Structure formats: structure tokens, C-alpha cells
Image (tube, grey):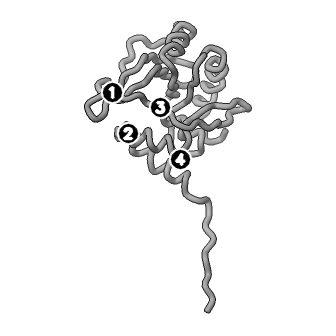
Amino acid sequence: MSHLSPALYATLLEIVPDLYVHCADPWCVIGSTAALLLGAETSAADVDILTSRADADTLTECWAPRREAAFVPAAEQRFRSHFARFRFSGVAVEVMGALELHAEDHWQAVLPGKLVLAGVNGMAVPVPSIDDQIRICESFGREKDLRRLAALHALRAPAFAVPIVSVH
């Protein structure tokens, strides 16, 4: 995929088979990598994986030698999950089991909504639909999420428009 950096591409090739083998519950890629996989004009520094709590535990065991135990995610007070960050040869992978967002004075589960499959070298990678990625970015409200909104909205626009000509 030409829009993926070589490092991101290599990491996806390495982790996606593991996700299919080791996750018992539905999982998906979210964040900037998910937007890129659907064709958004953005960049991605890591791969964010949304899983169940149990699957986050399983992945933490499987990928234990790669774990960055000292890493503390930003915006800790706004998000909570069964979190772990792992170093792969390409880019870092962040697993968020049972991710929740603190909004309107309570914790809310972050639900991916409708999942679509993006192809990477013959592998199907589940990501939230464009509309659900927009919803998630808006709910997160961080500067980096709001910057990604324009790229996601551009995916909803028609690739071309046929002018309507009126002849009198």
C-alpha cells in the first residue's frame, strides 16, 4: 500500500496475524492508522488496537518481550483502558483493552461502531467506518484527533462532480 510508510506496513504485516490468532473477541485498528488504511491524507506514528480486556491480557503475555513497561500514555485523566505499549521493528503498537473516555462527568465505553475491512498485502484489517472514525475523533476532542477530521471528511466527498447544465 503506497500510502503506508514502510515501517507501518512492516508492523501491520507482523501483528495482524497475531491478532487473528490470539484475540477471542472482535478487535480493530483505530486512530491515525485506521484513517490511513481507508485512504485519508494523514500520517501515523504508531498502531492503536482496540480490544477486549481479556484479549489485551492475552496480547500482553504474547508480546511480553516487546513491552515498553515504563511508557505512560498522554491524556491519562481522559482515557482509561487495560493499556500496554509494544515496540515492533517498524512502529510502536498500543493495545487498549476495554477503552473508556471520560466525558460528561462519567466514563463511557469507546465503541468502534460499524467495522469495515481494509486490505494490507492480502490481509483483512478491521477498522471503524469513515463515519464512525469521525464520531470517535470528535468525541476524543484532542488536537491531533481534530486535525484528522478534515482528512476523514474528505473521504466522504465525491471524487468528482458532474456539473448540471441548464439550457433555456
Residue at 63 percent across and 71 percent down: it is 162
Amino acid type at circle 3 is: Leu
- Please provide percent x and percent y for residue 12: 62, 27
Q: Which residue is mark 1?
A: 107
From this view, report whether residue 97 is shown above or below residue 57. Answer: below
| Residue 111: assigned label | 3
Q: Is 78 positioned to the left or the right of 148 in the image?
A: left
Q: Foreground mark, 1 or 4?
A: 1
Looking at the picture, tell me which residue is in the foreground, 157 or 47.
157
Q: Is 165 positioned to the left or the right of 123 in the image?
A: left
Q: Foreground mark, 3 or 4?
A: 3
Nearer-N-terminus badge (3/2): 3
Q: Which residue is mark 2?
A: 139
Local packing at callout 4 (Cα closer than 10 Å; few below 14, some 14-19, many 20+) is some
Q: Which residue is mark 4?
A: 41
Amino acid type at circle 4 is: Glu
How far is disc 1 from disc 2 in space, using C-alphas?
12 Å
| Residue 131: assigned label | none
Amino acid type at circle 2 is: Ser
Q: Give the residue at the far right of this rendering.
A: 122
Q: Quick one: SS at disc 1? A: strand
Amino acid type at circle 1 is: Trp
From this view, report whether residue 36 is shown above or below residue 87. Answer: below
Q: Foreground mark, 3 or 2?
A: 3
